[in-house]
Image: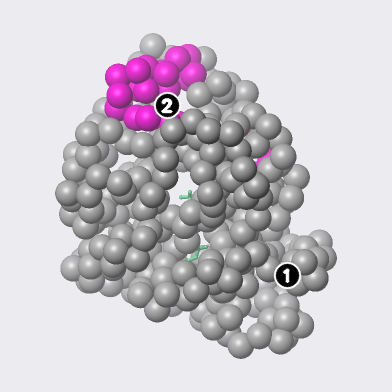
């Protein structure tokens, strides 16, 4: 699906996780909800159904898969679903271990080896440091420990998954970071609106996540708890201004993220219908300029509830 051959960038190109220019956008399947109970109003499906859904996504052309050691059984499901494939790019995330600098490389390697066993893989194409904080980026020996993992061919490339702009900026102090994964959606453009240029100039790829804001940007908002009433009101207002039916709101949310500088759009999809809707949305391409401008204007009216960490 992607070429690792170095070439000059063309219009519409994005950086892939190896720092090579490729045509975008790529969709990635997020697996938090497949591996554990997660999100409002849903129950986790049967293991066999999740495996068959992951295989279906692969058959439909999805080649990027995002998981984490902390996502319950997700790594095991991916390992079983994608066994025997050679072109599926499975990325996993790890919290930075709280150890001395001298033990950092060994400790990270143990976590990676454990994941590789669950994923049934020899090498991780992309390791992301999970919820990396500013303080952690200053950890002595971190760049060296990450370089050791690459040198030992446990991982091919390294990135971070973060929430805030200052965390993105801090992570750029690390030479080894080639991918930044951060929230980007219709209600929250804080990082992408300001940092895509700088990331591209440093040849760091941007992965948009929380594109549906954990289902809030879909009909699912109706089962969100009462405490998130302001969020619901805001989304209902936007939907009414857009004049779209419910099934189109997630498609607009996805198309909003199709833009230069967004290398991969990571989606938490749970079933074949959501996947079909996502593929259809991608085939329509970016949103028309006027729609995009309207959405960006609404962003200044959003409150702290765009950060799921503040949710009940
Ligand atoms: N037509 C429709 O109705 C429709 C269409 C598409 C999607 N949806 C729904 O939208 C939801 C997916 O939303 P999404 O794409 O924003 O992705 P998501 O799967 O909800 O996850 C977004 C990110 O939030 C972070 N996160 C925050 N709190 C977490 C927690 N407690 N546990 C695990 N991860 C947490 C994770 O990132 P890090 O781990 O990197 O921090 C995760 O990648 C699904 O429920 C799906 O069914 C509905």
* Residue 103 point in image, percent of width and height: 35, 16
Residue ID at (54%, 54%): 25
* Number of residues whose C-alpha sits closer than 10 Å to that of mark 1, classed few (under 14), some (14–19) or many (20 or more): few
* Number of residues whose C-alpha sits closer than 10 Å to that of mark 2, classed few (under 14), some (14–19) or many (20 or more): few
Height in image: 10 above or below 281? above
Q: SS for tag 2?
A: loop
> Horizontally, is 136 left or right of 30 in the view?
right
Q: Are marks 1 and 2 in contact (CB under 8 Å)?
A: no
Height in image: 281 above or below 263? below
- Magenta stretch: includes residue 106: no
Q: Which residues are magenta?
A: 141-167
The disc placed on residue 126 is none
Q: How is the image coloured?
A: one colour
Q: Nearer the viewer, residue 254 or 220?
A: 254
In what quadrant of the picture does the C terminus appear?
bottom right
> Horizontally, is 287 left or right of 97 in the view?
right
Q: Nearer the viewer, residue 254 or 161?
A: 254
Q: Is residue 192 visible?
A: yes
Q: Where does label 1 land, which residue?
A: 288
Residue ID at (23%, 71%): 49
Q: Is residue 216 visible?
A: no
Height in image: 112 above or below 67? above
Q: SS for tag 1?
A: loop
* Residue 136 point in image, percent of width and height: 54, 27
Residue ID at (71%, 35%): 198
Q: Where does label 2 land, which residue?
A: 98
Residue ID at (25%, 63%): 55
| Mark 1 residue CB less than 8 A from any atom of ligand 1 | no
């Amino acid at each position: 699906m992607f070429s690792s051959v170095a070439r000059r960038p063309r219009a519409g190109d994005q950086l892939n996780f190896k720092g090579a220019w490729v045509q975008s956008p790529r969709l990635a399947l997020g697996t938090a909800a497949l591996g554990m109970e997660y999100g409002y109003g849903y129950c986790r499906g049967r293991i066999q159904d999740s495996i068959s859904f992951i295989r279906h996504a692969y058959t439909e052309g999805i080649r990027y898969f995002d998981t984490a050691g902390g996502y319950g059984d997700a790594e095991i499901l991916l390992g079983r679903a994608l066994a025997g494939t050679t072109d599926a790019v499975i990325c996993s995330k790890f919290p930075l271990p709280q150890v001395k600098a001298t033990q950092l490389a060994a400790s990270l390697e143990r976590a990676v080896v454990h994941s590789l066993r669950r994923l049934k893989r020899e090498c991780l194409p992309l390791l992301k440091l999970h919820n990396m904080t500013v303080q952690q980026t200053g950890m002595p020996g971190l760049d060296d420990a990450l370089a050791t993992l690459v040198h030992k061919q446990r991982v091919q490339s390294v990135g971070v998954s973060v929430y805030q702009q200052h965390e993105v900026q801090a992570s750029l102090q690390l030479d080894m970071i080639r991918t930044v994964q951060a929230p980007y959606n219709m209600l929250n453009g804080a990082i992408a609106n300001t940092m895509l240029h700088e990331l591209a100039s440093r040849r760091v790829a941007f992965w948009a996540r929380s594109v549906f804001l954990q289902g809030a940007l879909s009909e699912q908002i109706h089962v969100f708890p009462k405490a998130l009433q302001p969020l619901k009101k805001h989304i209902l207002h936007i939907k009414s201004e857009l004049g779209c039916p419910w099934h189109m709101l997630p498609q607009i949310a996805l198309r909003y993220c199709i833009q230069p500088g967004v290398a991969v759009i990571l989606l938490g999809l749970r079933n074949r219908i959501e996947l079909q809707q996502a593929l259809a949305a991608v085939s329509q391409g970016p949103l028309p300029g006027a729609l995009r401008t309207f959405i960006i204007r609404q962003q200044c009216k959003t409150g702290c509830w765009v950060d799921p960490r503040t949710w009940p």
